[in-house]
Image (spheres, rainbow, N blue to C red):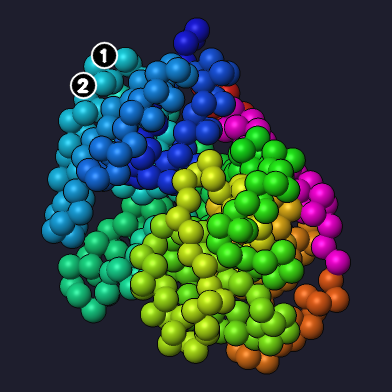
Amino acid sequence: MDVKRVLYLSYDGMTDPLGQSQVLPYLLGLSKRGYAFTLVSFEKPGRFEEGKNVIENICEENGIEWHPLVYTKSPPVFSTLKDIRTLKNKIKALHSARAFHLVHCRSYITSLAGMWMKKKWGVKFIFDMRGFWADERTDGGLWNLKNPLYKIVYSYFKKKEREFLQNADYTVSLTENARTEIRSWDTANTFSEIEVIPCCVDLELFDPRKVSCTQVDLVRQQLQISPGQKVISYVGSIGTWYLLEEMLDFFRQFLIEFPGSIFLFISKDDKEAIMEVVQKKSIPREAVRIKAAERNEMPLLISMSDYSIFFIKPAFSKKASSPTKQGELMAMGVPVICNHKVGDTSFVVDTYNSGIVIEKFSGSAYQKSLKQLVNMDFNKEAIRKGAEAYFSLENGIEKYNSIYEKILR
């Protein structure tokens, strides 16, 4: 087998931030190892118009054949069924022309099509699960199980989850915590082998050595942050899982310990929506900055942080979560303030001395952690080395390459 033809299926768009940080970098690296990729993704119309030229150029330069499809959002459930039908029709045409050796499926929706390909044509199938998707929908309040329709859909995907694990030639989990959980299930002896690959970070992009003090000083001036003011940042969208109120409660305690500090949101989220919660928490507006940023601007803005915070709603599904921001922050040498019971985050913080872990969302817990924070001497270079050891994109690409070689041998 000279050229190994791989069909990569993603229900996330390549014009979404997630596609650009957690799909394309792997495909670019694997393309250099001799795989011919055909990429099918579902794109949200607004973002697609804005970003399609950039993605087209990246794919063209790296020999990736990209087939964007239109993501439909409503009505719930029925729009997804329509997307699955569209995907299968696209696959039929592509497989007829390419005869793929392997289908790599990101998450559950595309795995329905991947398992179908395996059964219909014998194509090797990777279940890149990304998390306990059906449980995420219920834990996040997106599927209310009191609604009979959502109860049926939830049961269907929990059944399919086991089928994916049984039929896959390989499964990829983001966390050791999730792999341990899956191995405890009663039918685990029928499941495929599971490899753990966290959300990796592009260490070339997120590199503090490429950010000059002059650049940081200029941005501080633009954002009206004085040289002596401590900065605690939040990176990314707030979304379903991130606990804005609890993070602001922590910041209120942080202000007592470090008066005059700034909470910097590096986010494209609605500014007024954030400021409403800031006001509700009686935090002075002048203590908050909100700055939207493109991916290539993130390292510079993160460089302004003394610390960065992310509190995530703890739930069963979060055993499988690997926050992308953790690797990016560590790569920039920034200590994190996070909560426990989320994937392998606590293990990473403890192993690489890269921040502190909050065990309870309470004033007393925040005070205790702040006393701990004051006495801790974080080493930025050591934190960066931790990111190189645990979140390296090159390591992730090598692990995927190893999986591909085992399957296609």
**In the image, is 409 to the left or to the right of 386?**
left
**In the image, is 335 to the left or to the right of 105?**
right
Which of the 4 image quarters holds residue 116?
Answer: top left
Amino acid under label 1?
Ala
Task: Please say if 38 is above or below 324.
Answer: above
Q: Which residue is mark 2?
A: 93
Q: Residue 111 at x, y = what percent?
A: 35, 42
Residue visible at 27% across and 58% down?
Answer: 156
Which residue is more in the foreground, 93 or 11? 11
Residue 185: tell me if it is visible. no
Which SS does the magenta portion mostly show?
helix
Neighbor class of circle 1 (other Cα within 10 Å; few <14, some 14-19, many 20+) is: few
Q: Residue 215 at x, y = what percent?
A: 65, 46
Q: Which residue is mark 1?
A: 97
Q: Are the residues at dot 1 and dot 2 in contact (C-beta closer than 8 Å)?
A: yes
Q: Which residues are magenta?
A: 377-401
Q: Secondary structure at mark 1?
A: helix
Q: Residue 26 at x, y = what percent?
A: 53, 33
Whether residue 201 appears in magenta in the rendering, the answer is no
Which residue is more in the foreground, 128 or 29? 29
In the rendered image, which quarter contains the C terminus? Answer: top right
Whether residue 380 appears in magenta in the rendering, the answer is yes
**In the image, is 64 to the left or to the right of 152?**
right
